[in-house]
């Protein structure tokens, strides 16, 4: 006996397929594995097995302290950071989970550029490793503006498993979009 496919099933499948866009640069067999986890509603359990706990960084000050510790450990010679905050306005529609910006401030006749990092407040309830990956990514922009080879070398210098965490972040975005994130 075959199952009747409804328009709700079609919409659900289209949503799942569009969620897999976060993995567009990866090998088809890897994307297919994640698709199977989505189809079997097992993506949340997969995440909990890899990352059972969320971080406890909830305030802007705690986030700033974490970023400054990383910067002072790996990038002492880089420009100073004026601000590191969680930002409610950043979402995936910006195609970003964090933003690095230069803010020009006028002090009398002088104009000073200050570095700021803004992290999406959606990341307040994810595993520490994934938050750390986003912070490392934004810190690397202090030295390298473009996503080039030197940029990714700096990221892996600060966080040796950077590429694995970036992949896991993309899988978490898929889980969020299809409603299977265990951290919400």
Image (spheres, rainbow, N blue to C red):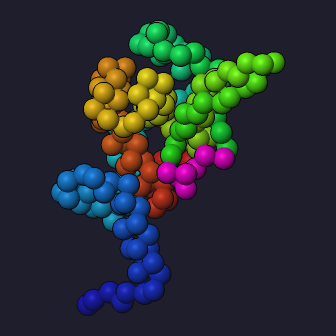
In the rendering, at what x and y percent does residue 116 appear?
61, 28
Image quarter of residue 82: top right
Instruction: Tell me if 150 is positioned left or right of 128 in this view.
Output: left
- Residue 138 lies in the magenta-colored region: no
The magenta stretch spans which residues? Answer: 89-95
Residue at (46% x, 61% y) in the render: 178
Question: Quick check: can you spot residue 124?
Answer: no
Q: Quadrant of the N terminus?
A: bottom left
Q: Note whether residue 11 is visible.
A: yes
Res. 23 image quadrant: bottom left
In the image, is residue 41 above or below residue 162?
below
Q: Residue furthest front?
A: 109
What residue do we see at 44% from left, 32% from top? 145
Q: Quadrant of residue 31?
A: bottom left
Is 152 on the left-hand or right-hand side of 104? left
- 95 or 52, nearer to the observer: 95
Q: Position of residue 59 (x, y in %)?
A: 67, 27
Q: Is residue 152 left or right of residue 101?
A: left
């Amino acid at each position: 006996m075959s199952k009747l496919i409804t328009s709700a099933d079609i919409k659900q499948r289209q949503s799942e397929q569009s969620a897999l866009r976060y993995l567009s640069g990866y090998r088809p067999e890897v994307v297919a594995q994640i698709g199977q986890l989505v189809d079997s509603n097992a993506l949340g359990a997969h995440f909990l097995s890899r990352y059972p706990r969320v971080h406890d960084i909830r305030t802007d000050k705690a986030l700033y302290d974490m970023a400054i510790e990383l910067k002072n450990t790996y990038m002492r010679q880089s420009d100073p950071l004026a601000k590191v905050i969680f930002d409610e306005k950043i979402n995936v529609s910006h195609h970003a989970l964090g933003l690095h910006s230069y803010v020009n401030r006028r002090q009398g006749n002088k104009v000073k550029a200050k570095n700021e990092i803004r992290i999406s407040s959606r990341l307040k309830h994810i595993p520490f490793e994934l938050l750390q990956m986003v912070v490392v990514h934004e810190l690397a922009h202090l030295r390298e503006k473009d996503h080039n080879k030197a940029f990714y070398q700096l990221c892996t210098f600060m966080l040796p498993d950077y590429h694995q965490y970036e992949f896991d972040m993309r899988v978490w975005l898929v889980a969020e979009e299809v409603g299977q994130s265990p951290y919400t």
